Image (tube, grey):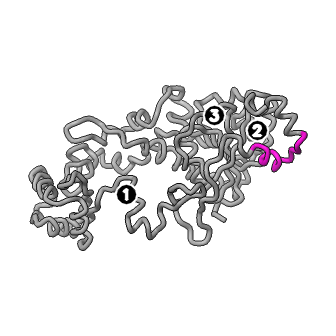
Amino acid sequence: MGPLDGVTVLDTSRLAPGPYCSMLLGDLGAGVIRIDAPTPPARTYRMLARNKRSIVLDLKNPRGREVFYRLCEHADVLLEGNRPGVMRRLGADYDTLAVRNPRLVYCSLTGYGQEGPLAQAAGHDINYIAIAGVLSQIVAPGGGPVPPLNLVADFGGGGLLAAFGIVAALFERTRSGRGQFIDAAMIDGAASLLAAHYSTAGELSRPGVGMLGGGAPFYRCYCCADGGYVAVGAIEPQFYAALCQGTGLDFVLEQMDRERWPEHSARFAQRFLEKTRDEWAAVFSELDACVSPVLDILEAPLHPHNVERRAFPIGPDRVLDVAPAPRFSRTPGSLRSSAPEAGADTAAILGDCGYDEEAVAALRAAGAFGAALK
């Protein structure tokens, strides 16, 4: 039983940030019910649907909304990811649902938030991190900005911080007895992740110049003889000394001489080309230098450290998965079920809410689940 055992989450979201948020909650024991539309979108992220059940509801159908309202009356959390105003038009906004369930924690996870000139604008991770100032700090050598996948806004600033907000609101509810509305904007979350670099006006992150932006020879990646890469993070003097020891280049006394950084980077780059990635990994396995092989997503599950920590377990569907995080000593997270098909649990969920077979049949005939499930 995870730390969120007994918490019921309704998830109406569709794209990556919302499903990731509810996956995190489900991993830690929450009972997540995914509310699918009659024609759900194609889902490409299998792992994000684990530890969930699915019910199909047509919220535009009065009988479908009736079921939705009953679910909300018994839920702790409602998560949605539509543009502002959509849920109100469906009669599923916070003000409406809070009347039925004052304890409901309602999280709206959007790109630009509930107000502002861009609130109704379309966007994706790359757009949110562009406006938040993040993308300008991630630049390829000699080139322009490089999208860091969709990790910063979708997953970090979006799903992860939304889950944090939900848990915080649930904790506050233990004192007040009341739920509340959470405006979780990915642009806000992305800016929050950049807080340390905003506080230094980008001094450390400035592309190609800043210590963490590729300018320092001791914080960057180097290509090896086989085309693989090593990641070097030897910031502290003792780690830099170990880096110099491992490579045989003695720049210890000149570490923070910024004028020498280009020369040092070139010398390190030349030296790392003399061995393969794994040969360098072997060299630095004996030195505490913050030097690591850059593993791809097929190699990472096989690394001895990840193997010992069981970081990539086999999931309930017998396919490689990612372990729940973080890890708890008494109430660990778990992988209990694989991704459900849309509507697979409709009858069981309705049964939990008190609908008998006859009532379910009547809802189906009325189109509450859409034409596909009539």
Q: Distance between the residues labelled 1 and 2?
A: 44 Å
Which residue is labeled 2 in the image?
68
Confirm whether residue 180 shows in the render: no
Q: Position of residue 316 (x, y in %)?
A: 60, 57
Q: Is mark 2 on a helix, strand or loop?
A: helix
Q: Position of residue 148 (x, y in %)?
A: 37, 43
Which residue is labeled 3 in the image?
40
Confirm whether residue 293 shows in the render: yes
Q: Distance between the residues labelled 1 and 3?
A: 33 Å
Query: Which residue appears at 69% of the width and 32% of the height?
Result: 38
- The residue type indicated by label 2 comes to Phe
Q: In this view, does 100 lie above or below 30?
A: above
> Could you classify mark 1 by the number of other residues whose Cα lies within 10 Å: few (under 14), some (14-19), or many (20 or more)?
few
> Front-most of 148 and 84?
148
Query: Which residue appears at 63% of the width and 51% of the height?
Result: 169
Which residue is labeled 1 in the image?
299
> Front-most of 172 and 154?
154
Q: In this view, does 265 lie above or below 201?
A: below
Q: What element carries label 1?
A: loop
| Secondary structure mostly seen in the magenta stretch | helix
For the magenta stretch, what is the residue range?
A: 346-358
Q: Position of residue 44 (x, y in %)?
A: 52, 40
Q: Locate the C terminus by quadrant.
A: top right
The label nearer to you, 1 versus 2, is 1
Q: Is mark 3 on a helix, strand or loop?
A: loop
Task: Tell me which label, 2 or 3, sits earlier in the chain.
Answer: 3
- The residue type indicated by label 3 comes to Pro
